[in-house]
Image (cartoon, rainbow, N blue to C red):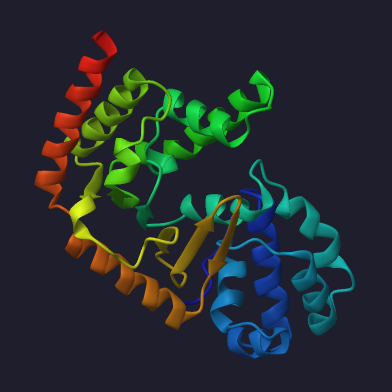
Amino acid sequence: MPGSRDLDPSASPRALLGAELRHARENAGLSQEELGQRLFVSGSFIGQLENGTRRMLPEYARMLDEELGTGDFFQRNCRAAAKSKYREHFAEAAEAETQATAIRDYASMLIPGLLQTPAYARAVSRAYQPSATAEAIEELVTRRMERARILGDPTKPLLWAVIDEAALRRVTGEPEVMAEALRHLIGLIRQNRVIVQVLPFDAGAHPGMQGCVRLMDFDDAPPLVYLEGVDTGRMEDDPATVARYRLYFEFLTASALSPEKSLALLEAMAQDYGHEKHA
């Protein structure tokens, strides 16, 4: 298991908690595996808490205080570290993707959030929350665009997306919104910033039909998989589970169009949507 990295406690509350957890664990003479056994989690999970990859939830804070003799330190500070702009089921995934070195994303019905334009994100948010105020929708759009800033780094993370053809054929917003969204995708591809493959209708049945899958790799922490459904999601770090979904993703890439053919299809579809705008 990789060792814990030195964290800057001023970086974030999670970084502070992670550094303090490592310090308390080492003072107690426990390995990550040994502490994990006492909390009924894996040693990898403890390492992810120490590295700041995962959020510390209240139930774990309580057990850590009990096992490490830290009074109520982790319980008192857990609340601040757990604060997030994102909904509870997604907050951990949003935080993890900022530290990932590679993200592999399968999207069945939507263009992945990191690849969306503001207009597309606005249409999606309005569809999910038809009675929300305009201000609430704009806040959601702003958060999504903030997440996409990680693509400003020219080297990481590696983002490899497999997008179902259904997500591209479904008109989200207006044709002009779709044309802009596809042109944005095309631009990222041509900048060599992302790898995109389209999973065509004629690929038939495949292992990703029941939802979206996001695999995340890290330099100094074990990989994670985030499984997302309608208004729900969960993070998994069990090695066997992560390996199973990695195999699923490999099947999807094998069934999808090549990156070159995918780009050609995206360009043709963007042109078609552009023509609809002027029809």
Against 270, is 250 above or below? Answer: below
Residue at position x 17%, y 35% in the image: 190
Residue at position x 43%, y 69% in the image: 223
Q: Nearer the viewer, residue 42 or 131?
A: 131
Q: Is residue 153 visible?
A: no
Against 96, is 43 above or below? Answer: below
Indicate the position of residue 76 as horizontal and vertical percent values: 86, 60
Q: Residue furthest top?
A: 278
Q: Quadrant of residue 267?
A: top left
Q: Is residue 86 visible?
A: yes
Q: Quadrant of the C terminus?
A: top left
Against 269, is 159 above or below? Answer: below
In the displayed structure image, the side of residue 221 where residue 170 appears, left or right: left
Indicate the position of residue 165 as horizontal and vertical percent values: 27, 45
Q: Nearer the viewer, residue 191 or 128?
A: 128
Indicate the position of residue 101 as horizontal and vertical percent values: 37, 57
Q: Residue furthest right?
A: 71
Indicate the position of residue 181 as horizontal and vertical percent values: 33, 28
Residue at position x 38%, y 60% in the image: 209
Against 261, is 219 above or below? Answer: below
